[in-house]
Amino acid sequence: MAQLISLTLLISLSILALSTFAKPATAQTTSNYYVTVNPTTPNSPIYTTVGRNWTLSFEASWSYGENSGQAIRNATVVVQVNNSKNAIVNTLHLNSTGGLFSFNYSSSTADTLTFTPIKLIAQDGTEYAPTLLDAEKSLYGFQSESITIWWDTFQVSVISINTSALGVTSVSVNVTYLLLPEEGLNLPAWATYSNQTFLPKTAQNSSVTINGVNAREISAGVYTADVSTWLPTAYVQVGVSQEEWVTTHTGFSFAHNANSPLWMYAVVIGVVLIGIVLAVSVFLGKSKKASFSAKKRYAVLGGSLLAVTSVISLYWGLVGLDSSLHGFDWMLLTMMGLLSFGFGLAASVLSLRGKNQALVIFAVIPPMLTNLVFVKTSLDIYQLANPWLILIGSIVLSVVSGVLICNADQAFRKDIDNDKIP
């Protein structure tokens, strides 16, 4: 019994001794940092419009050793800029003499950017980074806090369209902010452009135009207007503006049900006229009791196809003109379409008459460029769908036209009478 009591007493004394000399685990794992770089404003997301400058500032200070708490003078801080996908979009090297690093930054595209100091270079060239310097003291070289800024813009989506009336398109759109979540966002007043503390997803009380017509707001974020268009495809541009926000322009395109039949009739009439021209040319060639040679046929057919591509250029010129009047930035398409039509049509007449082959060959190029390059470039500005069937078809017609005209040398020779061409 005495031995049991002695053993119990010995174990108790051992536990007491160990607890006396033991240190808390948290004290051993607490990390220390030689250099600290923190923002001078609260680390909270900042919300603003694209294109607007925002001033950011960080303060660098010693946080360990005899200079702890003092600003780091004459140093360089490296700030890494990441986007919403955590990809590095920029790396800034900021210099300061008093320990405060301030700079302006802006984004031309909607994105959430995070600014994180990742390194400090002292005056003597020593680099401090988030690496372990002394394991026993849990001492690291660098610590920092980030600043996040949301550069936002407007997002426009079509709710409904009505193209049942001839020459009129009724459009209703929903206008929201692109980056904000559906439930909105709560932020401190200082962190927003207008000192708002709650930001809704819908863009209310904005100035909205649809093809230059002022739209009326029928409910929160929903705007509607009736616009005029006589094209078979309705091109609609929605402009959204708001105080202190960059105005945005969003384009949409869709078939116009009421206008399309009229244009179908125009296409049929055009095809018939081209057929008549070809038939008359063949008839005149045969009426002179001479064989209507293949070379002459090449010139006539090539010129006719050139006329077709020129008419297609005219259509795109009219699209550019009508859309430019409604706010689209398509004046270059307008000029190229009209010039290509006039030049190409004149050259097609020369081809039918067998004159000036070099000029006719060159005239094939402007409609080809207009009907593909300028059309695609103009549509891509507003991220509109390309009518590839029409674009590729017009290119094929231009290539065939050029090949036929290039192979009609004898039809363009002025010193040989067309009746004597074998």
Image (cartoon, rainbow, N blue to C red):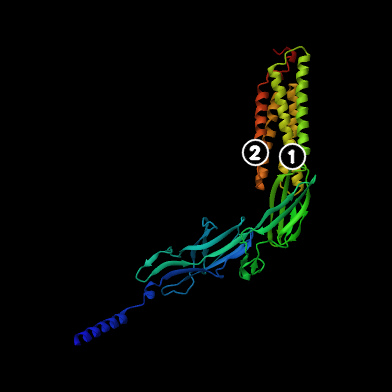
Along the viewing direction, whichever of 375 and 76 lies nearer the viewer: 375
**Mark 2 or 1 closer to N-term?**
1
Out of 347 and 233, give the one closest to the viewer: 233
Query: Mark 2 and 1 residues: CB-CB less than 8 Å, in contact?
Result: no
Left or right placement of residue 264 versus residue 378 in this view: right
Q: Which mark is residue 388?
A: 2
Residue 101 position within the rendered picture, expressed as x and y whole percent measured from the top left: 54, 66
Please name the residue shown 63% across and 59% down the image: 152
Q: Quadrant of the N terminus?
A: bottom left
What separation in Å lies between label 2 and label 1 (alpha carbons)? 18 Å
Please indicate, yes or no, whether residue 340 appears anywhere in the rendered image.
Answer: no
Quadrant of residue 297 within the rendered picture? top right
Q: Is 285 positioned to the left or the right of 143 in the image?
A: right
Q: Amino acid at mark 2?
A: Trp
Q: Residues within 10 Å of mark 1 (few under 14, many from 20)?
A: many
Quadrant housing residue 346: top right
- Residue 346 appears anywhere in the view: yes
Q: In this view of the protein, which residue sits in the foreground, 152 or 351? A: 152
In which quadrant will I find the C terminus? top right
